Image (spheres, grey):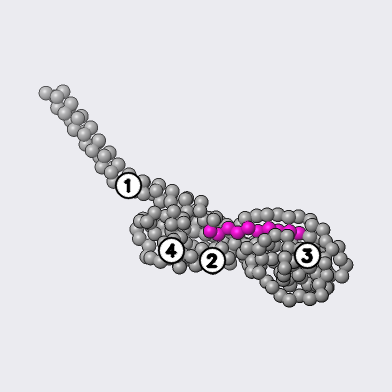
Amino acid sequence: MKKRGSHIGFVLSFVIFVTFLIFLYSALFPKFNEKKTKENILNNIFKRLPEKIYSNLTTQTIKINQVDNTRCFFIEKSFEGGVVIKNQTKEKIINSSVQENKIYFKDIDDSELLWIFYSDSFEEINKNFRGCEDLSYENRTIKEDKLPSIKRILELFQEYENNYSKLKGKLLIPENIDFEILFKYENGTLINASRTKRGENVYGKINNIVYFDETANFKTGKIGVIIW
C-alpha cells in the first residue's frame, strides 16, 4: 500500500507540474508573440523610412583659376536639383542663382575653392544677375550621396497630418496598429506627430541619423516611431 500511495503521489505531482506549465505557456506566450510581432512591424517601418526622408545630394568642389574674385561669374550646371554654394571653409553661403542651366554667383571673396551642393531638397533660386563672366576653374572632386534631408523629414510629418491612412499603407502598417512619429533636431528640439491617444502595449524604436538642412549643413538627430 505504501508503494501504491507513493506512485499515486508521483502521478499527481506530475499532473500538477504539467498543468502549471500549460498555464504558464498560455499566460506568457501571447505577450512574447505580441512583442515579436510589433518588433517586426517596427523593423519593417524603418526599412521603408529611407524612401520617405532621403534625398540625393551631390557635392562638387572646384578650384578657381581667376585672380580677381570680386566680380560675377557663371558655370554650367552639372547636376539636377537646387544649388547651394559655399566658400572654401564652408562658413559662408555664396550669393547665387540658376538660370537656363547655368549657375551664376558673385562675391566669392578670396576663396580659391568652392563647394557646390546639388539636391532636390534645396530651393531653386532665380535672381537676375547681369554682366557675369565665364569662370575659369578645374573640377577637384564630385561625390554623390543619398541622405536624410530636413525638407523630406518635415514633408513626412505633413503627410502624416494630411494623409494618415495613405502613409500607413505606404509603410505597410497593419490596419489594427496605430503609430506616431518623432524627430529630434541637433539642438534638442523635439517634434512629434500623433493623431490618437496611445493605447496599451506600446512599442517604439529610435535611430540616430545624420541629416542635411536647407543650406547644406550636416547635423545629427534622432527619428523614432511608436506603435500600439
Residue where numbered disc 4 is placed: 164
Vertically, is 174 above or below 70? Answer: above
* Residue 226 appears in the picture as rendered: no
List the residue tagged with mark 1. 30
82 on left or right of 209: right
**Relative depth, front residue between 145 and 80:** 80
Q: Nearer the viewer, mark 3 or mark 4?
A: 3
Eye-nearest disc, 3 or 1 = 3
Q: Quadrant of residue 210?
A: bottom right
On the image, the x and y values in percent for residue 39 come to 43, 50
Is tag 2's residue or tag 3's residue first in the polypeptide sequence?
3
Q: Amino acid at mark 1?
A: Pro
Label 1 crowding class (10 Å Cα cut-off): few <14, some 14-19, many 20+? few
Q: Is residue 12 left or right of residue 34?
A: left
Q: Secondary structure at mark 1?
A: helix
Circle nearer the viewer, 4 or 2: 4
